[in-house]
Image (spheres, helix red, strand yellow):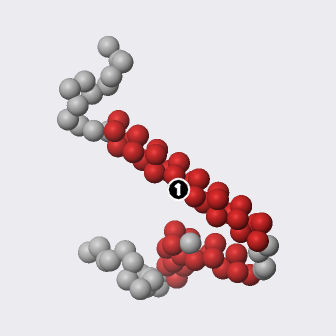
Amino acid sequence: MRHVKFLARTVLVQNNNVDDACRVLNRILGKEGIFDQFRRTRYYEKPYQTRRRVNFEKCKSIYNEDMDRKIQFVLRKNRAEPFPGCS
């Protein structure tokens, strides 16, 4: 049986295997950005560092969105010529 992936950040421990459960929890927290937020708030971030980080995150999200759109275009299944340019 598959359990819900994110249920209030609850991790099931199976067969008393706490190490695997900790690994899963760390992966969940890493994907959600909890560790990054903790590291950022640990020390004071100067305003110019904040601006640089925010601008970098914006550029990264725009790039990722564009690449996802291109990948989805290439992976479409209903194209007349599935591999354009390859004869």
Image mark count: 1
Give left or right: position of 4 versus 21. left
**Residue ranking furthest to the top:** 87
Which of 58/42 is in front? 58
Which quadrant is the N terminus positioned in? bottom left
Residue 41 percent coordinates (x, y): 70, 80
The residue drawn where x is 42% and y is 47% is 68
- Can the viewer see residue 20? no
**32 relative to 85, above or below:** below
Residue placed most toward the observer, 86 or 3 = 86
Place residue 43 in its image quadrant: bottom right
Which residue lies at the image location 51% right of the left edge and 52% below the top edge?
Answer: 62
Disc 1, SS: helix
Q: Answer above or below: position of 81 versus 38.
A: above
Relative placement, left or right, of 56 versus 82 is right
Q: Residue at x 20, y 35 (%)?
A: 78
Left or right: residue 16 compared with residue 82: right
Instruction: Inspect the image, locate mark 1, and give the three-letter code of the amino acid beneath it.
Output: Ser
| Residue 40 occupies quadrant | bottom right
Q: Which residue is mark 1?
A: 61
Residue 82 in sight here: yes
Q: Nearer the viewer, residue 45 or 79?
A: 45
Quadrant (top left, top right, bottom left, bottom right) of the C terminus: top left
Q: Where residue 42 appears, x then y in whole percent?
A: 74, 81
